[in-house]
Image: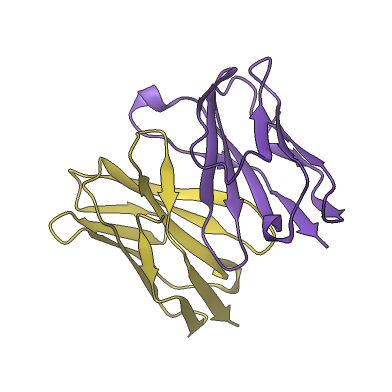
Chain colours: A yellow, B purple
Amino acid sequence: SQQGEEDPQALSIQEGENATMNCSYKTSINNLQWYRQNSGRGLVHLILIRSNEREKHSGRLRVTLDTSKKSSSLLITASRAADTASYFCATEGDSSYKLIFGSGTRLLVRP
Amino acid sequence: GAGVSQSPRYKVAKRGQDVALRCDPISGHVSLFWYQQALGQGPEFLTYFQNEAQLDKSGLPSDRFFAERPEGSVSTLKIQRTQQEDSAVYLCASSAGVSIGANVLTFGAGSRLTVL
């Protein structure tokens, strides 16, 4: 079972444009994480936002969290071809150690 | 080591064969996880170790799946009598520990298993 669900499932944009991905989850959380996965590789942690935070920045990444709507968004500004990857949100499941991943958004950035 | 290392990267097995997948976590990482990722899906939790203790194996799909971490470092995921539905990428991840407030995982590149 998956706690988080991302939308859209797939997104294609031109290099230089911004990309926005959304994640919805079901139960209350302590924090939410975003990971990136390049084709054929493992997942790489991008950013963590805690439940008492509303927005967080890291380089070209901006993450927002709305606990009242149980949703988060990941914004990548000024996208590059190298940003082409799948992006997953992850929240704790029924235990603090168990990260539950959504089904991901596949982002294609066209040069 | 510098990262999480998994081997083999690719494994093709005939239905009914046993396979063993190895994970070498980051040195000193207490927590180790195995996830299964089907094509086009997110990773699904299989099992969790804290040092050598397997604290949660609730995600293992059947009793054909077995994981161990006997000395609290390297872990092996074994699948007996493989079936076609076992075809997936098996991801190993480690973390410094969950008691620090947030469980941030470092993943290996995965072992892609294809069962013919």
* Vertical side of B51 occupied by A23: above or below: below
In percent of width and height, residue A33 lies at 38, 49
Q: Quadrant where the C terminus of chain A lies? A: bottom right
Does A77 sit left or right of A26 as displayed? right
Of residues A20 and A18, which is closer to you in this image? A20
Q: Residue at x 54, y 26 (%)?
A: B49
Q: Residue furthest left?
A: A68
Of residues B25 and A108, which is closer to you in this image? B25
Can residue B25 be seen here?
no
Q: Quadrant where the N terminus of chain A lies? A: bottom left
Does B48 sit left or right of B16 as displayed? left
* Vertical side of A59 occupied by B39: above or below: below
Q: Residue at x 78, y 59 (%)?
A: B114
Q: Residue at x 48, y 83 (%)?
A: A13
Of residues B57 and B34, which is closer to you in this image? B57
Q: Residue furthest top?
A: B71
In percent of width and height, residue B6 lies at 74, 40
Does B44 sit left or right of B13 as displayed? left
Q: Residue at x 82, y 50 (%)?
A: B16
- Residue B93, picture quadrant: top right
* Vertical side of A32 occupied by B77: above or below: above
- Residue B35, picture quadrant: top right
Does B98 sit left or right of A94 as displayed? right
* Vertical side of A6 occupied by B53: above or below: above
In percent of width and height, residue A5 lies at 37, 64
Can residue A28 be seen here?
yes
In percent of width and height, residue B31 lies at 53, 26
